[in-house]
Image (tube, rainbow, N blue to C red):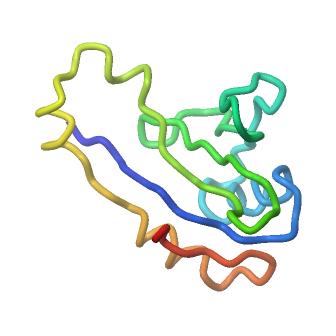
Amino acid sequence: MVLLSCRVNIKSDLCLEDVASIVSEHLFGGVPFVGRDQHVRDEVPAVYSSRYILGCRFLLSGEPDAEGYFLEVSHHERLKDVTAQQIRESLVDVSSDIVDLLKSVGSIRVVLPS
């Protein structure tokens, strides 16, 4: 089993939906982000990939403020019968790859969180 891990900080003055559209086009072949009205994050607006990508959902949350947006992977459905040890042994962090793929997009600035 492989579990992707990703936590990338995206800075932009654009709204959540516009940033999601950019991420979708550059990373996921246009798979749209949906679910803003579902309040998947209590504290900030969030959207998620409408389809599974490599067995997981990608979640984009945040606002166009100093903290910006965060792109993360969600595995809730896949982790029902998985132990913490299995998770640690299965994680593959693709954060640096995501930063590399998005670094040339002009309307966003992508960094690894500090």
The N terminus, quarter of image:
top left
Q: Residue furthest top?
A: 81
Q: Nearer the viewer, residue 112 or 26?
A: 112
In the picture, measured across the screen, residue 53 lies left or right of residue 11, that is left
Quarter holding residue 83? top left
In the picture, measured across the screen, residue 44 lies left or right of residue 113, that is right
Q: Residue at x 46, y 71 (%)?
A: 114
Q: Nearer the viewer, residue 16 or 105?
A: 16
In the picture, measured across the screen, residue 26 lies left or right of residue 18, that is left
Q: Residue at x 69, y 55 (%)?
A: 24
Say above or below: 91 vs 56: below
Say above or below: 15 vs 90: below
Image label count = 0
Q: Residue at x 72, y 60 (%)?
A: 25
Quarter holding residue 59? top right
Q: Nearer the viewer, residue 51 or 61?
A: 61
Question: Residue 87 at x, y = what percent?
Answer: 21, 36
Q: Residue at x 58, y 65 (%)?
A: 9
Quarter holding residue 77? top left
Say above or below: 44 vs 94: above
Question: Residue 101 at x, y = what percent?
Answer: 54, 74
Question: Residue 74 at x, y = what percent?
Answer: 48, 36
